[in-house]
Image (tube, rainbow, N blue to C red):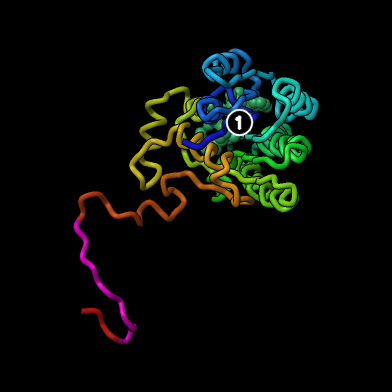
Amino acid sequence: MYDLNGKVAIITGGASGMGRAASLLFAQAGANVVVADLNDSDGEDVVQLASGSGNEAVFQHTDVSAEPDIKALIECAMDTFGRLDIMFNNAGIGGAIGPLEDVSVQEWDRTQAVCLRGVFLGMKHAAAPMRAAGGGSIISTSSTGGLEGATGLFSYSAAKAAVAHLTKCAALEFARDRIRVNCIAPGGISTPILFGIAGNNKEEVESGLERLQPYPHVGQPQDIANAALFLASDAAAFITGHTLVVDGGATAGPRSAAPKTGRKRRSRFAGPSFERPE
Ligand SMILES: NC(=O)c1ccc[n+]([C@@H]2O[C@H](COP(=O)([O-])OP(=O)(O)OC[C@H]3O[C@@H](n4cnc5c(N)ncnc54)[C@H](O)[C@@H]3O)[C@@H](O)[C@H]2O)c1
């Protein structure tokens, strides 16, 4: 377990899915946590669970796309805990889904506002308190949908690609201040964001997720929380500008290239092409 004792973390989208798992894990690792979300009731529940012996958690209602809300969020961390060490820009929505020609400008803009502007604002306003503290770790949630094309999720996919690029730019910008900037690109993870898209059917979503990547596992919020904890911790002290892919090998290559379970294979050697293999 990585140690976050004495550190203060903000986690946006902390009321559900990966943000919820990260809030609980960061608290378990000793951090004081500010859970930020639009969803007040689930956010307050997370705060109850994340407040334990030796650490505290508070909830701050936040729309990550609104600059005044992000300013208020940083102020909340500073007023409550006096410092900021970790900013996890994780809130997101699926946004505009459908044929590209049918996506409206309003839906496009709203998707960008939450998935990209929200990350920019988190970076922008977390930098000063982190600089004052002598350094920090900014982590954002991108997606494998931002590394590969995805039909239907055009606006989301473009925003997530931009998050990975913005991460590199910000890593350069803040390196001298010892502020590390990284992002995580999750593959398919079993969270409510997918249940919503697939008509609230968790079982259906999970059976699809199991077949999504070569590694035989249904991606869970905890898998992403573990990656975020590593990037937040001093164990990642020399890692910045990086996109950490957490996808069970889904983007390692086509799934069809992975050997099938139980199928016996023969080893061979392919030499110069003029020599015919035996
Ligand atoms: N689940 C997946 O398969 C998957 C894959 C790749 C990336 N992601 C990304 O992971 C992140 C976390 O999503 P999740 O899967 O845990 O889904 P989730 O829906 O469980 O959690 C997202 C949280 O963000 C909050 N949120 C949405 N809009 C907000 C706003 N404007 N301001 C503040 N909070 C807001 C929601 O209320 C929710 O609590 C998102 O950025 C998502 O795009 C998810």
Tell me which residue sits at (52%, 30%) in the image.
29
Residue 78 figure quarter? top right
Residue at the (64%, 18%) spot, across then down: 58
Three-letter amino acid code at the position of disc 1 = Ile
**Residue 249, percent from left and from top:** 42, 49
Q: Is residue 265 magenta?
A: yes
Q: Can residue 151 be seen?
A: no
Mainly helix, strand or loop, the magenta region?
loop
Q: Is residue 245 visible?
A: yes
Q: Quadrant of residue 116?
A: top right
- Residue 233 percent across, percent down from the top left: 56, 40
* Magenta part of the chain: 264-274
Q: Residue furthest bottom?
A: 274
Q: For the C terminus, which image quadrant?
A: bottom left
Q: Work out whether 261 lies above or below 202.
A: below
Q: Residues within 10 Å of mark 1 (few under 14, many from 20)?
A: some
